[in-house]
Image (cartoon, rainbow, N blue to C red):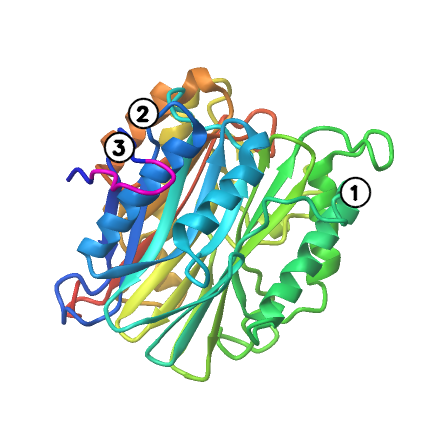
Amino acid sequence: MQHQGAAHPVADTNAGAEANVNAKAGDSADVNAPRHLYAAVSPHLGGTCQAQLAGAVAQIADAFSAQGGKITSLAVFFRDPGQARQVDLLLRELYGAGKMPATSYIDQAPCDERSLVALEATGVAGDATVEYHSPQVTVVRYDGVAWVQTGHSAARGHWHTGSAYDRSVQAMRQTKRLLASVGASMDQILRTWFYMGGIVADDAGGAPGTQRYKELNRARTDCFRHIDFLAGRVPGPAGRTVYPASTGIGMAGDDVRLSVLALMTDRSDVLAVPLENPRQVAAFDYGQHYSPQSPKFSRAMAVVHGDQATIYISGTASITASETQHLGDAARQTGETLENIAALIGEENLAGHGLPGFGTGLRGLGLVRAYVKHLEDYPAVRAICEQRLGGIPIVYAIGDVCREDLLVELEGIAHSARPGAPGA
């Protein structure tokens, strides 16, 4: 479906690319049942970043409106990070006071060289309330459950100085403040996104020879040490170690940024189940030769609400056990990554985690984000994703993966329902 850009005081433009929209969960049930909406746009037309942005925002608005939905979060990818402040001002004008979703500004160039900016949007339709608390915090409420999405500012704050460790700690402290502003807390986080400039470079602000990603892992370990994530919501023995699903990926510059998704509810029947991959060693069990402090995240987090499950898939790469596969071959790494995701979200793996009757295949994905290390690998990565995943919304962006030998990383959101449930 093609959604034309609508006239706007700032720009009257067609973004030149389809707003690829997907609706998941409750699709065949009551029209008033909450449904997740996903969209991705890499605009082709318009002479400026602002013109492309205005057209893409209009397309997403039209597409979500056609589904009876509202936008809940926005991720903006830049070819020129210097445009971030101007884009932020334009978005505030486009959405208006009190209507701007939680927005993350990511210094990664879209892989399509015609695109000066790319947008990924999530939304919700049906009986759900959307609260726009600030351009960095959105709360979505339905069925006694509140989902808190945070973004990160386009402007540099006073904490954007110092070592990679210090910047990572400050990003987590800022997130803690954002969550507290709506009554949420760090232990309710189920999904994190860490963006780090120069992720595999040595840390100029730290000890000589110290890699920045390893310092992020050290900071994450220290900050997470005393947090009992999703306590009382995770089935199984009390006191088990639980970490959120996560992505840790490189971007331009030297900043560290963090956005999160948190879950608030008093309902005892809403479960959060961390998933590991049968094909991989748990990331938090990696050997010290990868990082003195292992990456503290789960391969995915499944949130079960009645007969529906939403699976938040961490950044996933071409790794089996703990070793990189298919060195130097981006196409084969993409295929291996998709095999990892299929195993992670499959029925057998969810049953093994105590969720029989759930699980799905690659076509159960509602949204994917693809990080490609080298632009020349983009055509091969895209061809395989389109062959295996069909037409689901995907943003392709240039991002440095946390190992030198990894050429691509994929993340996503999948949905499944028990057989016989509405929408199954």
Instruction: Give coordinates of residue 223: x percent, y percent.
Output: 72, 60
Measured as percent of width and height from the top left, residue 341 is found at 38, 44
Residue at the (80%, 41%) spot, across then down: 163
Residue that carries the numbered disc 3 in the rendered image: 14
Query: Horizontally, is 284 left or right of 279 in the view?
Result: right
Whether residue 54 can be seen here: yes
For the residues carrying marks 1 and 2, which lies nearer the camera in this image? 2
Type of the residue with mark 1? Thr
Question: Depth check: 60 or 344 in front?
Answer: 60
Disc 1 element: loop
Q: Which mark is residue 45?
A: 2
Quadrant of the rendered image containing residue 226: bottom right
Q: Which residue is mark 1?
A: 161
**Which amino acid is tagged 2?**
Leu
Cα–Cα gap, marks 2 and 3: 7 Å
The quadrant in which residue 75 appears is: top left
- The span shown in magenta is 4-11
* Quadrant of the image containing the N terminus: top left
Percent coordinates x, y for residue 352 in the rendering:
38, 62
Looking at the image, residue 44 sits to the left or right of residue 215; the answer is left
Q: Which mark is residue 395?
A: none
